[in-house]
Image (cartoon, rainbow, N blue to C red):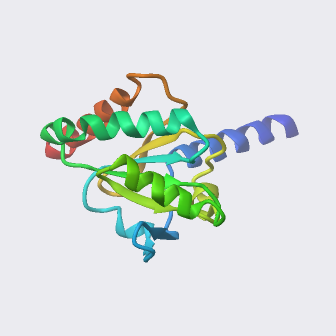
Amino acid sequence: MKKLFFLLCSVAAFSAVSAQSLPDVKIENVDGEIVSTASLAGRKPLIIAYWSIACKPCIQELNAINDQLEDWRKEADFDVVAVSIDDVRLKATAKAKVASLGWEFICLFDVNQTLKRAMNVSLTPQSYVVDAEGNIVYSHSGYTPGSEQLLLDKVIEISKEKKQ
């Protein structure tokens, strides 16, 4: 009976995690300003992608998103947030990488990994789609060329649902 109770509690805890919303965490933007992640939610859908300078698939995914961003924005109104999980020693290198790659989206630097922990990110690349109300509606780990399309598909889906 105790095992069954534990199993049911585990399932309930998993369900709660899967229905989580974007946590409110203070984090640094590319200009060095501290912003609240809650200020990102509540306007339009978000794609949030975690990356680090040592993660080649992360950079490939973000480059692919950046390359298609103009066309994607014709299909849906959304923002992309790239969250570097590099620590304070690598922050300058991460900021230089963002500048050199010309990413045209919001870039945040989670040097203390506060947001990473709050969202239970264990591996990169890790991407999320957050709806306009701040609810996490999709999560994807890893990257293979073309898998970024799944993120756009989910953004389009929730954008259509909101219009109905």
Left/right placement of residue 156 relative to residue 41 reads: left
Total count of labels: 0
Query: What x and y, as percent, mark residue 59?
Result: 47, 39
Q: Is residue 110 visible?
A: no
The quadrant of the rendering that contains the N terminus is top right
Residues 148 and 94: in front is: 94
Residue drawn 64% across the image and 40% down it: 123
Q: Can residue 117 be seen in this view?
A: yes
* Residue extending furthest toward the bottom: 33
Residue drawn 36% across the image and 70% down it: 39
Query: What x and y, as percent, mark residue 142?
Result: 55, 30
Residues 100 and 159: in front is: 100
Residues 35 and 91: in front is: 91
Left/right placement of residue 43 relative to residue 34 reads: left
Residue drawn 57% across the image and 63% down it: 91
User: Where is 162 relative to 27, above or below?
Assistant: above
Query: What x and y, as percent, mark residue 15?
Result: 57, 42
Residue drawn 35% across the image and 33% down it: 64
User: Where is 61 relative to 119, above or below?
Assistant: above
Query: What x and y, as percent, mark residue 75?
Result: 15, 36
- Report which quarter residue 110 is drawn in: bottom right
The quadrant of the rendering that contains the C terminus is top left
Left/right placement of residue 56 relative to residue 2 reads: left
Residues 10 and 53: in front is: 53
